[in-house]
Each structure stands twice: as C-alpha cells, then as structure tokens.
C-alpha cells in the first residue's frame, strides 16, 4: 500500500494566513494541497539557498566592508534557518506533526528582502561588474519565486516586492543616471510578475479541482453519494494496515436490505432509487466521524467503523437497524417499508486481510438472514461447520453475495 501523503500544518497567524491565500474559495483538501506547495521540491530549494549564500560570501570576501559583512551574516543565518525549517517540516508532515508553516512564510519574505538588500549595498559601492553578478542572481531568484510560490500568489508578490524595493533603492541612490530607469522598470516588473503568479495560481487550482472531481467520481457511488467499491477497498486496506500495526481495530458491517425487491416491483425503479438514496442518507447520519459507509451495488452496503469490540459493533448495528427500518415517505403520500440484515466481522480478530474479513462478514450476513431477516449476526457466532456450509453454498452459486472488496481493490 502506498504511504500516506504528508500533511503540512495550515498557517495560523492572521498575516501569514492572508499571504498563503489568494482569496479564492477552495475545498479543505485542495487548500491543504496548496499549503504543501509552499514547501516545494527539495532540490530546487537547496539550489536557491546555495546560490544566495555563495554570492553573499564571495561578494563579502571581495568587499569586506562592515555593511556587506553584516548582510552576509544575515543572508547565511536566514538561509540556514529556512533550510532547518524545511527539513523539519518535511519530517513532521510525514508523521502528522506541526510543520511551522507560519515561520516558513515569514522566512521566505525575509529571504526575499535580504536578496534585494545585497543588490542595494553592492550597487552603492559603484563596483559595476560585481553589481551585475549580484543583480543577475537576485533577478533569477525573484523570477523563481513566481513559480515556487504558485500555490500562494500573495506570498510570491510579497517576496518579489521585498527583493525589488531595496534593489531599486540602491539603483536610484547609486548616482548612475542610467539606473534611474529602474524607477519605472521595477514597479512594472512587480506588477507583471504578480499578475503571472495569480494567473498560474488560477490554473493550478482549476487543475486540482478537476483532479479532485475525477477522483471523487472514481471513488463515490453516483446514486447514493457513498463510497463505491474502489473507495471502500482503499479505506479497508488502509484500516487493515493500521490494524496490523496494532494502531486501530475496527468493525466491518455487511448490510443487505430486506424487502427492497417488493418496493421496486410495487412502485417502480425510480421510486426504488429514491428509497436507496434515503436509506444511504440514514446510514450516513448514523455513523460517527471517521467511519465509512459504501454501496457495493444493488441493495448491499458496507460500513467500516472504528472500535474493535463486539459491544460497539452490535450497538452500531442496532442503531442502523432502527434507522433503516423506519418508514420511507413517497411523493404520493404513501410510505415504503424495508428492513436490513447485518453481518459483522471485527478486524484483526476475524481477519487480517480484505478477502477473509469480507468473507466472514458475508457469512455472518447469511446467518442473520436465516434467522428471519432484520437481525444481526457476528462472525464469531458462526461456528466452523456452519461457516463451511455457507461458504460451500456460495462457491456453488447458491447465494447472492459472491463478490468481495478485495477483487475491487
């Protein structure tokens, strides 16, 4: 199974939250993905840090003036602090810890300012060859910010402005008349780069939203909005992995509606679909946060619920029995009634893999139906002889439940 995606902490401070946002409303999962882009690709980050520190050290060795020495120290301290925060954030994100996103944003703005400050100071020395080297480096870094912080265009604008303003100040105070053109050039560049950052951000968000919609379509049942086979398989495999690591036990409830065929025969398939959708909504509302409900197809559902005790699973099963068995109002003022039978298996005690767990729950469901429907059976209640009988019947095609999530995953 693939490792979970790292999760970076959202910014908490008012200013950093504003800088990290474009003001465009997005779902929480897309917002989290945008925050992750602030930490970028490590090789690109290391290249930027190495470039700015190398330029600062070389310039200071060439011009060991007090102001340039102070700038070099500031540049090195900020760069190394950014590197330490970056390394910590990437480790913390993988284990679900705090990633100090606010500090990372503040350091990015400070780094932009020190980049521009170095250009300002070297321009004031009148050493034009060295100034060209420093300004080319600063321009390259500024241009890179437009792309590095595409997930936060306001932050990109702030970093670019932080670099351009001191560099432009140095150009205007240098005494070189030709550099007066920077009074027009720098604002125009800032506006252009900012517009580009916002445009790239809109493209990125549109792409993320399209990918999100596609993923939802592949993981959700279109009629009920519950997880489909693929979504259930992914969640089941993830929970089994955690159970194997002794981090989380859980229950799998296999549900089959009783009397649903009569609803279809009496009222038609359109009404039957509406009843399925209402049953799914009742199912969803009965679950706790973090539990998963899904539809296998037809009138069969699966619930994955936290808690590995039989008492917890039976409590949830009885709640579902009551909720799903209540009358369903129809458009013509009449009502429809259905019931539900539930088979329950616990992980990892009843099975450590998807196929075994589904088979045990499926067999318990057969037992529940044999009791007269509208009942619950635990996998632990099914003895070996009974289980062998039901599984032999299933292999012979005697029962309806001849499919498992493991085949969908």
Image (cartoon, grey):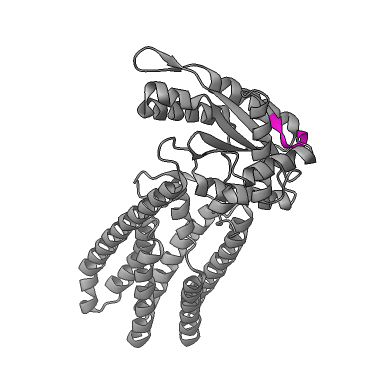
**Residue at image coords 45%, 43%:** 220
In the picture, measured across the screen, residue 14 lies left or right of residue 346, that is: left
Q: In the rendered image of this protein, does residue 89 appear above or below residue 214?
A: below
Indicate the position of residue 351 as horizontal and vertical percent values.
72, 47
In the picture, measured across the screen, residue 405 lies left or right of residue 150, that is: right
* Quarter residue 84 falls in: bottom right
Q: Report the quarter where the N terminus lies.
A: bottom right
* Quarter residue 290 falls in: top right
Q: Nearer the viewer, residue 42 or 113?
A: 42
**Residue at image coords 37%, 66%:** 147
Residue 303 at least partly seen = yes
Q: Nearer the viewer, residue 394 or 374?
A: 394
Indicate the position of residue 174 as horizontal and vertical percent values.
30, 76
Q: Which residues are magenta?
A: 377-382
* Quarter residue 150 falls in: bottom left
Magenta highlight on residue 378: yes
**Residue at image coords 42%, 74%:** 118
Residue 291 at least partly seen = no
Indicate the position of residue 136 as horizontal and vertical percent values.
35, 79
């Amino acid at each position: 199974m693939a490792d979970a995606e790292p999760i970076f902490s959202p910014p908490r401070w008012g200013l950093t939250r504003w800088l990290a946002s474009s003001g465009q409303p997005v779902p929480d999962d897309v917002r989290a993905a945008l925050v992750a882009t602030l930490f970028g690709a490590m090789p690109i980050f290391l290249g930027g840090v190495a470039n700015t520190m190398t330029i600062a050290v070389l310039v200071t060795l060439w011009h060991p003036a007090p102001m340039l020495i102070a700038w070099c120290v500031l540049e090195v301290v900020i760069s190394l602090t950014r590197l330490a925060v970056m390394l910590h954030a990437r480790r913390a994100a993988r284990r679900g810890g705090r990633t100090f996103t606010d500090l990372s944003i503040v350091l990015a703005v400070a780094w932009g300012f020190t980049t521009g400050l170095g250009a300002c100071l070297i321009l004031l020395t009148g050493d034009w060859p060295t100034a060209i080297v420093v300004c080319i480096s600063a321009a390259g870094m500024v241009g890179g910010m437009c792309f590095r912080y595409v997930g936060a265009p306001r932050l990109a604008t702030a970093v670019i402005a932080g670099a351009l303003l001191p560099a432009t100040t140095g150009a205007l105070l240098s005494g070189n008349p030709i550099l007066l053109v920077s009074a027009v050039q720098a604002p125009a560049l800032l506006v252009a780069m900012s517009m580009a950052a916002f445009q790239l951000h809109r493209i990125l968000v549109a792409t993320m939203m399209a990918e999100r919609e596609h993923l939802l379509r592949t993981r959700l049942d279109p009629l009920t909005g519950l997880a489909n086979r693929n979504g259930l398989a992914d969640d089941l495999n993830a929970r089994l992995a955690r159970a194997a690591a002794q981090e989380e036990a859980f229950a799998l409830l296999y549900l089959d509606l009783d009397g649903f065929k009569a609803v279809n025969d009496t009222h038609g398939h359109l009404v039957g679909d509406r009843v399925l959708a209402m049953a799914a909504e009742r199912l969803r509302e009965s679950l706790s946060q973090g539990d998963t409900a899904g539809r296998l197809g037809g009138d069969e559902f699966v619930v994955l619920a936290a808690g590995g005790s039989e008492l917890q699973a039976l409590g949830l099963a009885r709640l579902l029995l009551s909720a799903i068995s209540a009358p369903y109002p129809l458009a013509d003022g009449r009502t429809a009634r259905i019931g539900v039978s539930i088979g329950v298996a616990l992980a990892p005690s009843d099975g450590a893999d998807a196929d075994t767990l589904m088979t045990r729950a499926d067999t318990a469901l057969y037992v529940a139906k044999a009791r007269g429907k509208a009942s619950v059976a635990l996998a632990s209640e099914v003895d070996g002889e009974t289980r062998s009988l039901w599984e032999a019947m299933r292999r012979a095609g005697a029962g309806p439940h001849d499919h498992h999530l493991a085949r969908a995953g």
